Amino acid sequence: MLNANRLVGTHDVLFVTLDTLRHDVAVDLCAGGRTPNLSAVLPAGGWEKRHTPGSFTFAAHAAFFAGFLPTPALPGKHPRLFALRFPGSETTAEGTALFDAPDLVAGFRGQGYHTLCIGGVGFFNKLTPLGNVLPALFDESHWSPELGVTAPRSTENQVNLALRRVAELLPSRRVFLFVNVSAIHQPNRFYLNDAAHDTIGSHAAALEYVDGELGRLFAGLRKRGPWLAVICSDHGTAYGEDGYTGHRLAHSVVWDVPYAEFLLQPEPGK
């Protein structure tokens, strides 16, 4: 685990959730060289297998913003990267960034960060009271149909918006940038030629598309300075395994998620 306690305040923070991405698909594509931009920033061991705290988007993100990122898929107590102070916590450690706040977004705000949300799936669309709950945590939040699950170029649009807004902020102002990538969530069949239905193949093709756009995001953010980055899935999804389809259910393809934390270093001479 990175020492977030030392990094918060000196580094901008990037938190990306690859909505609905399965662990097995992420690992297979990385091993096959199909996600070169992610492979270039992942730690030496590649994607870490973790368990999500929620089987669908809202539940998982509510836990994330409460300081409970996906848990290492191993027995034992595991220290957390970020945490909110509460009595009896057994998973805070010296390297944990600990906040006296009701949620992580407020915690970063209290440390002087501008908090910026680039929404993706429906729980970030701000079209209903429920769709406003998570975006309302942030100083600034964005959503439009062009960023959502039905837009084939959604990740391109999300990256363009994120880079533009970060560039417009003062270099001296720390940023907590959250991006909920929507492209992997169903429907994803338009990323696979002639696919009539969503399949694990179109799921993988969507990740390849996302990887191409994340390369631009990483390159653009490096121009600003150093970043502490966390990238993970919020949950997986089933494509017929043991008769299951979708998520919000208890199956390993839903609960097992890919996770990575790393530093994005600035360009040479920055």
Image (tube, rainbow, N blue to C red):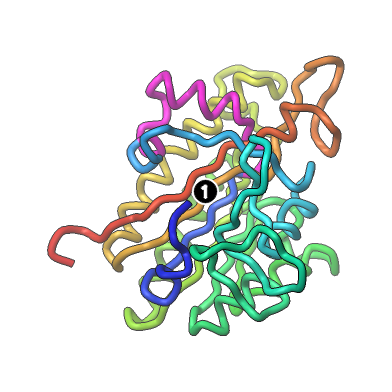
Q: Magenta segment: does it hold 107?
A: no
Q: Residue at x 53, y 69 (%)?
A: 97
Instruction: Tell me the SS state at disc 1.
Output: strand
* Residue at left offset 78%, top offset 68%: 133
At x 51%, y 55%, the residue is 158
The picture places residue 35, in percent across and down from the top left corner, at: 42, 31
Which amino acid lies under the numbered mark 1 shown in the image of this protein? Ile
Residue 109 x/y as whole percent: 56, 81
Q: Vertical placement of 108 versus 89: above or below?
A: below
Left or right of residue 167, residue 229 in this image: right
Q: Magenta span has 23?
A: yes
Instruction: Please tell me whether the stretch drawn in magenta is mainly helix, strand or loop.
Output: helix
Q: Nearer the viewer, residue 99 or 28?
A: 99
* Percent of width and height locating residue 88: 76, 67
Quarter occupied by residue 127: bottom right
- Provide the residue span drawn in magenta: 19-39
Identify the image quadrant of the C terminus: bottom left
| Residue bearing mark 1 | 231
Up the image or down, 237 lies above or below 269; here it is: above
